Image (cartoon, rainbow, N blue to C red):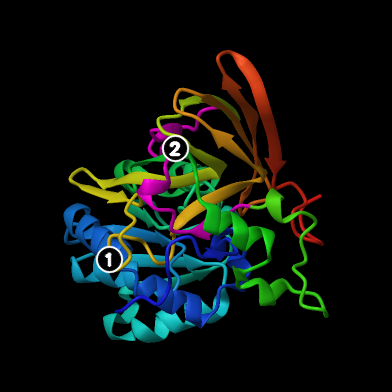
Amino acid sequence: MSQTYSAEEVWLPASELITAWDDGFHELLLGDRIRMAAYAEAIREVVRPGSTVLDLGTGTGILARWALEAGADRVYGLDFAEPVLARAARELAGFGDRFIPVAGLSFDVTLPERVDVIVSETLGNLVDNEGCVAILTDARRRFLADGGTMLPVDAQCYLTPVSAAVAHSNVLNGRVHGAESIADDDGGLLVRDPFSLYYDAIIPIAAHLASPRVATTHVFGADPSPATSVSLPHTIRRDGVFTGFKGYFVSTLAPSVALDLSGDDIAAGSTSDSWKHAYLPIREPIPVRQGDRVTLDFSWSPRGSLGNDYRWRGRVLRSGSVIATYDHGTVADLVGGAA
């Protein structure tokens, strides 16, 4: 499928708008070559004939289909969006009663048995944007049989300062794809501050001002870390203008299958069309020099059952002296959203 977008175009973050996902977004998911290839291979690796499987967040049922084709005896397809779950049931009708749709939020449902494999694609481009850590921790405790398998196994979120002038200009001037879905009557974006929201965008590796660093690591077969913040120092490796941070994840889906969102070649198909990267902008661009240090205090807190709020703040230092500071966060970013 040919792509029609360019580097540094920005979109409203899909992870912030889960309840608004429509057929068009599900088609985007199904057309994401990076996503589809990695999950197909991982499911073939871990699902065995006779297995029972939970597809948590089944959507249109493609992961459930692959599990059934791999020989699963039963697949429970769980999703809170009943219309899309009905579509999955229709598309998997040929498997008879081997596909069992389950409607609701995972925290609120029970299953008649424990399963051998939990498959989920509730990852966001910062890993936990959609609340996957709490969701999968609860699912592992209540739904997974002893010795069962989690897919994904783990995921790491990387952050790096970038010089992304086009992306910054797009945010500043309201050139944001999808903004019409939350626009006011005059076409203005219903956000209190466009620089207190992260965005989806492909940010080229050439825009990196420093080496990416791991911000968070999540192992889905273990209880989550109690940490809610991390401090990351970055050493600037070239002159440029610091406009924000790029975030992405690398996940081990199965022992021999990794899903890596760091790619930036849109034409070659090395990017994820549905996830893209996360762009965390700062309001005032800051000129930086090789050898400067950008400190990042990155923190997160739960927002209900389907996501997190984030804060990114820090300083820019030159020869030990502070030359600039920044402080942004997503708390109450959308009008009528989190308080």
Q: Is residue 269 left or right of residue 112?
A: left
The residue located at (37%, 47%) in the rendering is: 206
Compared to 55, does 29 lie above or below? below
Give the mark nearer the N terminus: 2 vs 1: 2
Is residue 212 highlighted in magenta? yes
SS of the residue under disc 1: loop
230 inside magenta stretch? no
Task: From the top left corner, tell me how far across and down residue 34 is, in percent.
Answer: 29, 62
Which image quadrant is residue 184 in? bottom right
- Say which quarter of the image contains residue 29: bottom left
Instruction: Tell me the residue at 33%/42% (across/down).
Output: 153
The residue that appears at 33% across and 81% down in the rendered structure is 92
The image shows residue 47 at horizontal and vertical percentages of: 22, 57
> In the displayed structure, does residue 252 sit left or right of residue 61?
left
Which residues lie in the magenta part? 198-227
User: Quick one: which residue is furthest to the top in this view?
Assistant: 320
**Disc 2 residue type?**
Leu
Disc 2 crowd, CA 10 A, few/some/many (<14, 14-19, 20+): many
Task: Please provide percent x and percent y for residue 72.
Answer: 24, 64
Residue nearer the viewer, 263 or 326: 326
In the picture, which quadrant includes the N terminus?
bottom left
Q: Which mark is residue 269?
A: 1
Residue 47 shows up from this direction: no
The residue wearing badge 2 is 209
* Mark seen at residue 339: none
Q: Residues within 10 Å of mark 1 (few under 14, many from 20)?
A: some
Tell me: 64 left or right of 292: left
Q: Nearer the viewer, mark 2 or mark 1?
A: 2
The secondary structure type at the circle numbered 2 is loop
